[in-house]
Amino acid sequence: MVSIQEKTVGREVRKLVINVGPQHPSTHGPMDLIITVEGETIIDVDVKLGYIHRGIEKLCELRNYFQIPTYLNRLCYVSGMFWEYGFVKAVEEIMDAKVPERAEWLRVIACELTRIASHLVWFAAFAADVGLFTAFPWGLRDRDRILDLLEMMSGQRMTFGYFRVGGVRYDLPAGFHDYAEKALNYVERNLKDYEKLIYENPVFLARTVDICPVSASKAIELGWTGPVLRASGVKRDLRRDEPYAAYEAIDFEIPVGKKGDTFDRVYVRMEEIKQSINIVRQALKRLPSGPYQHRALLYPPPGIGYGYVEDSRGECGYMIVSDGSPKPYRVKIRSPAYVHVMSLPKVMKGSKIADLYAILGSFDPCLGEIDR
Amino acid sequence: MIDNIIIFLKSYPLLVYALRVIVAMIFALIFMLINALIFIYVERKVWARTMQRMGPTYVGKWGILQLIADFVKVLNKEIIVPAKANKLAFLSMPVFITGISLLLIIIMPYDYVVVNTLLVLEPFISWIGLLKYAIVSQYFQVGVLLIFVILSFNPIFILLTGWISNNKYSVIGGFRAAAQLLSFEIPFLLSVAAVVVLTGTLNLYEIVEKQKNMWLIFLAPLTFILFLITAIAEAERTPFDIPDAESEIIAGWNTEYSASPFLLLIMGMYVRAFVSATLLAIFFFGGWLGPTLPGILAPVSGPFWLMIKTYFFMVLYILIRAAFPRYRIDQLLNLSWTKLLPLSIANLLIVIVLKYYLVSIGFMS
């Protein structure tokens, strides 16, 4: 009754081709993984993307520079701040615009809070992927506190519109420091629960340790960036290597993994949440006074700019070609999650069906940015 | 009139026996339906609290009517049969699976529970005393064996269900279930064999009566742990809910089912979970043994303790579900064949030596 494809590869083997997606509870969005299995073992994966392609690159060519960030924070709905920042950074590079000191620090705060929120959502989703549903509401509960902070900063909870060329849109509201300290303490306290739930859990360890290890050289070869690359032991972080905003003045560590397996990808992200909390605390303490935005040109002169920042998933980048008109001539978006997801077939052949979701979840795919 | 009925029935012993089984089944079925609802409610509430959610709150006080509302809602759904599935086989499988699972409950002393509870009304309604004759479960001299016979039907039916659905996820779920249930059957059987060796009987009633001096949990803790693990696996609950892994293969072997067939399958699964919790209470925690309740409640103290112990294990299942993710199927089979199987064989040998010692000092007969 079930169509079973038969192929002869030396001996008679029975293969089953399964469509995982586009509507599947564990693909984190509408993506289609066509997997070929032999029993429980995956022998081939084919990634089909494009189910929510909205043509944002083209839309950018039809809007002026003030309208564009509205589209960009919808690229990834859990880490909107980074995607605005990348664009703003590229435009500032073409303009050679100066950004006030306070704005640079506010940008750090916005980015790191978004990183915490994004990693908390990832933790919730990943835990559900391996069957630990208890952690799902926990992650979202804590993320809500962080979203409160972001709402205080920008007026929005998900699609912020906070960055603008030459600074940020709003200054911090009154009472932000107190609430931030409270929220960060809350998240930090709960992180201990998370660690107890996953690091001391034999079943969780069985599901993540030594699953899909990727060596450092292979990770670089595949073009990985961000936590996924750092899990393989490569100490590459744009915040440290090519510092932007106020990161140069901030003291923080870059957590790296040892083996590059799924557990290391979990570990690196959990440590990054702690580091981000640390960064936000430092930034709030050392926040200088002064203007939070400069009056910038309406649109940049002709030129090419590439702005890239350390997103919660990797390096997100924008290449903008300006011809001196109010609208960009071309906007090219580099999505880190796209690179990670497209390398799935290269790293996961031979693993079991259940591992597919653990591995895919550990890459933290966000279909908004992958399909653009 | 009651005397006349008794005289009439005494002349037809076979008819009496049939009537008793039928009455027992009806009682047990109603009992199971009510308990399935209570258990699902408890599960949703307890699990929600571990997640810091509220669980059901809207329907009725504390959401107690939520399950009734869900029940009615599911019944209202359309029964969808996949296009290329065999309709008759597809729709009859849930009946088989649940029917087989319900057979388990006449072996369990649930009728004892129900009848004893109803006997409280005896001073007010005279004929209710007759229900004492409806208890049949204590006459199953080989009750333990019968449980295994019935449980071993499950892998076949589940595999067939997955296959008949004409869905790839269902097939994977079906094969996973078959592999899991088959490989856990052996350690399960061996750990129960240890219980049988200790108590020297296959009758569930006698197993409980033999624990009057000391509950088996204190005599054989290793057996208890082995039985707990294998019972969770046999009931297909987390961390061994691999056959219907929600985030992996949608709903596994019951992916294609909707409306009342789905309800039947869910009911069958909860019956199995309930039965395994009852077995834990009976084998290791002395079943209905416990201090007698005061006053008018004295006759129900047995059923009361049995239910308390059963629900203790149900809540334990829920907490285990909240704390652990899901094993992978090959890790699960590894666990079963390389760890549980040698352990349960060793455990059986230990228990035999223990029994020999206990008999020699006169603690047991």
Image (cartoon, grey):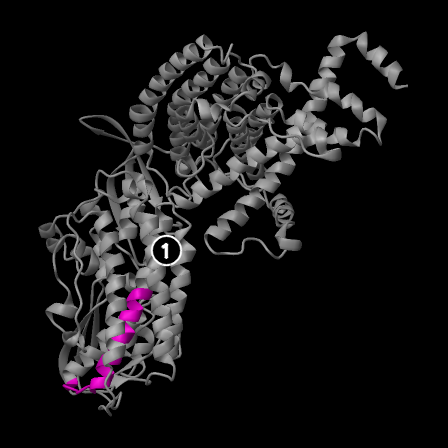
Residue most toward the right? B1
Tag 1: residue type? Ala
**In the displayed structure image, the side of residue B73 where residue B156 appears, left or right:** left
Label 1 sits on a secondary structure element that is helix
Vertical relation: B204 (above or below) A26: above
Residue A2 x/y as whole percent: 40, 33
Q: Residue at x 33, y 52 (%)?
A: A126
Q: Nearer the viewer, residue A281 or B20?
A: A281
Q: Quadrant of residue A355?
A: top left
Where the N terminus of chain A falls, by quadrant? top left
Magenta residues, dominant SS class: helix
Q: Nearer the viewer, residue B79 or A269?
A: A269
Residue identifier under label 1: A124
Chain letter for mark 1, please.
A
Q: Nearer the viewer, residue A200 or A111?
A: A200
Point out the stretch of residues depicted in magenta: A95-117
Residue B120 x/y as whole percent: 76, 31
**In the displayed structure image, the side of residue B60 where residue B13 appears, left or right:** right
Residue A99 lies in magenta, yes or no?
Answer: yes
